[in-house]
Image (tube, helix red, strand yellow):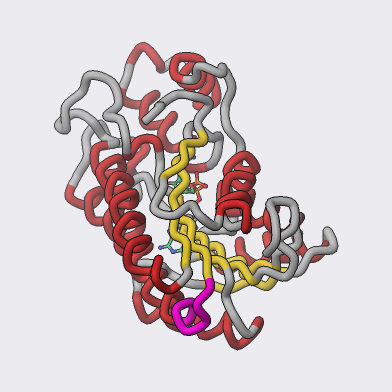
Amino acid sequence: MTDVTNLDGAITLVTGAGRGIGQGIAQVLSERGAIIAVSDLDGAAAEVAADALNAAGRTAAAFQGDTTSQDSMDALAAAVLDEFGRIDVLVCNAGVIGAPGYHERTDHTEADWDATFGVNVKGFVHTANSVAPHMRDRRAGKIVNIASHGGRKPRGARAVLGNIQAPYSVSKAAVIQWTHLLAIELAPHNINVNAVCPGTLWTPMWEAIAENRKASDPELAEFTPREIFEMSVKDRMPMGREQTPRDIGKAVAFLVSDDASEITGQALNVNGGAVMN
Ligand SMILES: NC(=O)c1ccc[n+]([C@@H]2O[C@H](COP(=O)([O-])OP(=O)(O)OC[C@H]3O[C@@H](n4cnc5c(N)ncnc54)[C@H](O)[C@@H]3O)[C@@H](O)[C@H]2O)c1
């Protein structure tokens, strides 16, 4: 790892990289020379994403792993070390908006709290538990946690009840605090830990959010999910445009480069100015 445009040979594990933002992060980092361990709960999606990187002349391998299980993350880290010999960069990205069926519910349920905290919070803890000891031994490493600007600012005027995104946004606030704690613990071991807070991106996750809004707000019934997404972008983004998975990848590339060697414990918004703290 030398600078933002050159991540040559950096062995990088990205969770949830079979699609969406994780796939965009894997693409950008691999274009800058990183070798990518593409990991996902959906092993077939990880295979397709890794094949696409290899077909483009990059180096990648696919791994199946469930971040909600410590055993699965231990096995994943062992498999990546077996394949590539070390892990320089860890990107904890795998996340969920809620439990299955989220898109048609009008309020959150116990299952949404369990799903968001299981994947978005404990999943990040499990993944760090599996990889950080290896980085500590080598006195080198970069960890980036994908949080959300939803973890910083409550949405709209709704309180917790009637706000289907409450479990998600609380889980993402927890990711930011987890980033602070991990950064303090790992700083003496020369390991940087930061978070990126994406804004509004058209991925399967946002499609579920739009379907949920369409189902629960009669005024939105006539619009397609994509139109609902575009209205949200227009309402919320001072820069007037949506973010893309590659935009998040570029921020991650900076944070794992030597240009960011004195940056740790920070949460970087990549959201066109929608939330500014
Ligand atoms: N899309 C947005 O607008 C947005 C905004 C802010 C933050 N984020 C965050 O970015 C990250 C990626 O979001 P996305 O929009 O690409 O979502 P997505 O639903 O499109 O993709 C998530 C990926 O994570 C995988 N995954 C889910 N549970 C897993 C588990 N237990 N173990 C391993 N992999 C698992 C899925 O199989 C999928 O490939 C998430 O942490 C999300 O909260 C997204």
List x then y, in percent, for residue 120. 35, 55
List x then y, in percent, for residue 238. 50, 16
The residue lying toward the viewer, choosing from 230 and 200, is 200
> Residue shown at 25%/43% (left/top)?
170
The extreme top residue here reads 219
Residue 12 seen by the camera: yes
Q: Which residues are magenta?
A: 134-140
The residue lying toward the viewer, choosing from 132 and 183, is 183
Our reading of the magenta stretch's main secondary structure is helix
The extreme bottom residue here reads 82
List x then y, in percent, for residue 45. 61, 61
Of the 4 image quadrants, the one containing the C terminus is: top left
List x then y, in percent, for residue 199. 47, 33
| 198 in relation to 43, above or below | above
> Residue shown at 16%/27% (left/top)?
159
Q: Is residue 199 left or right of residue 29?
A: left
Asked which quadrant contains residue 149, the reply is top left
Residue 73 seen by the camera: no
Of the 4 image quadrants, the one containing the N terminus is: bottom right
Magenta stretch: includes residue 135? yes
Number of on-image labels:
0
> Residue shown at 56%/84% (left/top)?
79
| 91 in relation to 97, above or below | below
| 89 in relation to 138, above or below | above
The residue lying toward the viewer, choosing from 178 and 207, is 178
> Residue shown at 66%/67% (left/top)?
36
The residue lying toward the viewer, choosing from 256 and 174, is 256
| 203 in relation to 81, above or below | above
Q: Is residue 158 left or right of residue 169?
A: left
